[in-house]
Image (cartoon, grey):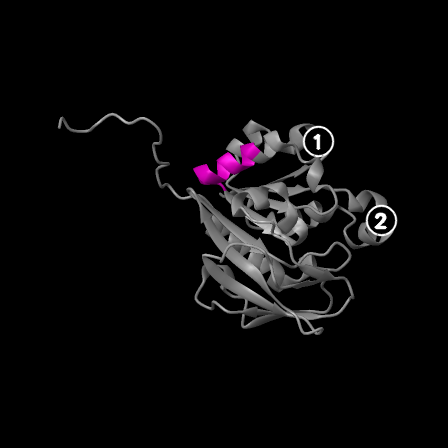
Amino acid sequence: MIQVTVWNEYRHEKTDEEVQKMYPEGIHGQLANFIGEEFTVRTATLDEEEHGLTEEVLAETDVLLWWGHVAHDEVQDEIVNRVHQRVLEGMGLIVLHSGHFSKIFKKLMGTSCDLKWREDGKHCRIWNVNPSHPIVEGVGEMIELEQEEMYGEHFDIPAPDELVFVTWFPGGEVFRSGCTYRRGNGKVFYFQPGHETYPSYYNEQVQKVIKNAIRWCAPTENTYPTYGHYQAREDV
């Protein structure tokens, strides 16, 4: 069975009553609740030793989910480098919502990953623009959320390997809200919904996307390449 680790900085839930009410078990707890229906899941948070991402935990992780917002700078560079190496070796990574500004996503993208944003409590429509992709299987043509934070272009990321979702917001903005990348042997999926005071992670279609993305991001048996000095295979 696919082994999933859900990482959350777990700060809003400790200090904000509105977030506590929305996610009483923490955002990582709600993610783990529905992910655990189909996969083996564990959680890790920022304030744990080594942020809960020890070498042993990562070695046992097939797919890592990442949610962060106010404490990106507190993530130790040593841990970022550790996660980065595991992605290159084949571990899948799903970056959610404000995780776009995390150190690990910026390191993998090589850009600022900045964007426009507005928290106005309005609805959005997440359009499926890649209907044959495994990540959208069973999701349908569109996901409509009653409330979600506006993220708008320009989103400073490299052109996605595959664009899966584009979201429309009633203020007139659009956003590349579902993007896939391959880095080394690993696969990366960025998915925009997930503001901490809105119920996006209770939405069944959003849950379906995340479960599909876990399957898509899971490692294959492909051999990790050999790098560095290399002995000739033939005498020349």
Give the distance between the C-alpha atoms of the residues marked 2 and 1, in whole angstroms: 20 Å
| Residue at the left extreme of this rendering | 236
Q: Which residue is mark 2?
A: 16
What type of secondary structure mainly makes up the magenta span?
helix
> Which quadrant does the C terminus fall into?
top left
Tag 1 secondary structure: loop
Residue at figure coordinates x 68%, y 27% from the top left = 49
Which of these two is toward me, 86 or 140? 86
- Tell me which numbered mark, 2 or 1, is placed earlier along the sequence: 2
**Left or right: 27 as drawn, with respect to 85:** right
Q: Does residue 133 belong to the magenta stretch?
A: no
Residue at figure coordinates x 58%, y 56% from the top left = 156
The spot of residue 194 in percent (x, y) is 68, 56
Task: Tell me: residue 206, above or below residue 231.
Answer: below
Which of these two is toward me, 70 or 57? 70
Magenta span of residues: 81-91
Which quadrant of the figure has residue 204? bottom right
